[in-house]
Amino acid sequence: MQPPPHKTLFPLLRRLSDGRFHSGEALAREFGVSRASICNVLAHAQALGLTLHAVRGRGYRLPGAVEWLDVRAVVAHLGCLRQNFDVRVLDSVDSTNRALMAAALDGAPSGTLLCAEHQTAGRGRRGRAWHAVPGGSLTFSLLWRYDTGLQSLAGLSLAAGLAVARAVNRHSAHPVGLKWPNDVVVGPRKLAGILVEVQGDMDGAAVAVVGIGLNVRLGAAQREAIDQAVVDLAELGVKVGRNRLLADCLAELHAIGEQFRMHGFAALREAWQELDVYTGRSVVLSMPDGRTLHGVAAGVDDTGALRLRAAPGAQPLTLTGGEMSLRLERDR
Ligand code: BTN
């Protein structure tokens, strides 16, 4: 877990993203801190992966325009869908998934959305960390409540992946696809990941926190820290602002979430398979205990379980579990 950032970090970054230079002295005056403190805070920003221009005699600025998240902008982009969400934006938090689950247990309503510019302990699947650069990604979690129990949530993470892929495809000339169980990908490279965490009864009240991390513009430090092939929206030439993109993700999540609530994943299976980049390909599935299974990917079933044909002509095996990972045979 990284230490929480200094309280002036994000106000400072917002100030520096107007494209102009700001002297250390003027910033120190404006924020009521010493010049040394400004210097330390900006060194921390660089350690987090932000690129800063520092020019002697002129001061500091952020070279690229950053569109910081803004509740009012997200709500305006949502239009009449706004009533389905309670949008909250934080500068920094340990993990939006952890914080939202805590809020859920405290009574937060279905539709609560928690976004953060920065996570000090972002969680990925399979116990991994999720790496993101402030202003260069979307990291958010959405709370949904159900009265149909945990048993009705099979396939929810695949459904969320479909929603994110659709939102990105509204803007991308290079169509993005899906990789079981819930990665949003361009070819073999990962654009977004989803971590769904649930609590509740098998049959009664249940909550799901749908956590999404989407690479908008990764820095060199993030790329180095991530131990898999990644891609970001900048490489795809997608220029949409982050507030608009977040609202589009929410709109797609809302539409898919309603279908899922009424009919389960079965109603989304075909649409999911249309974007599946692995169907018909030779793959290797790694199990949590280290064993591997080889076969040809054959889509998913009505619960979102992977269908894997281990031998030609054989009935596909169905495999389920968030702890598994899939890769192409030729990438071994
Ligand atoms: C994966 O490993 O593919 C899943 C990554 C999920 C990351 C997101 S970022 C927002 C939310 N908060 C977290 O701590 N994790 C999820």
Image (tube, rainbow, N blue to C red):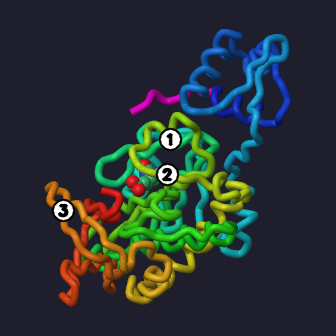
Q: Kindly indicate the quadrant of the structure image that contains residue 164.
A: bottom right
User: Residue placed at 37% from the left, 57% from the top?
Assistant: 105
Q: Earlier in the sequence, mark 2 or mark 3?
A: 2
Q: Which residue is mark 1?
A: 223
Q: Earlier in the sequence, mark 1 or mark 3?
A: 1
Quarter of the image where the N terminus is located: top left
Q: Which residue is mark 3?
A: 292
Q: Kindly indicate the quadrant of the structure image that contains residue 148.
A: bottom left
Task: Specify whether 166 is left or right of 179.
Answer: right
Task: Specify whether 291 is left or right of 275.
Answer: left
Vertical side of 293 occupied by 314: above or below: below
Q: Which of 240 and 223 lies nearest the eye of the viewer?
A: 223
Quick check: marks 1 and 3 in contact, CB under 8 Å?
no
Q: Which residue is mark 2?
A: 230
The magenta segment is 1-7
- Is label 2 within 8 A of ligand 1 (CB to nearest ligand atom)? no
Instruction: Pick out the residue farthest to the front.
Output: 330
Q: Kindly indicate the quadrant of the structure image that contains residue 174.
A: bottom right
Q: Earlier in the sequence, mark 1 or mark 2?
A: 1
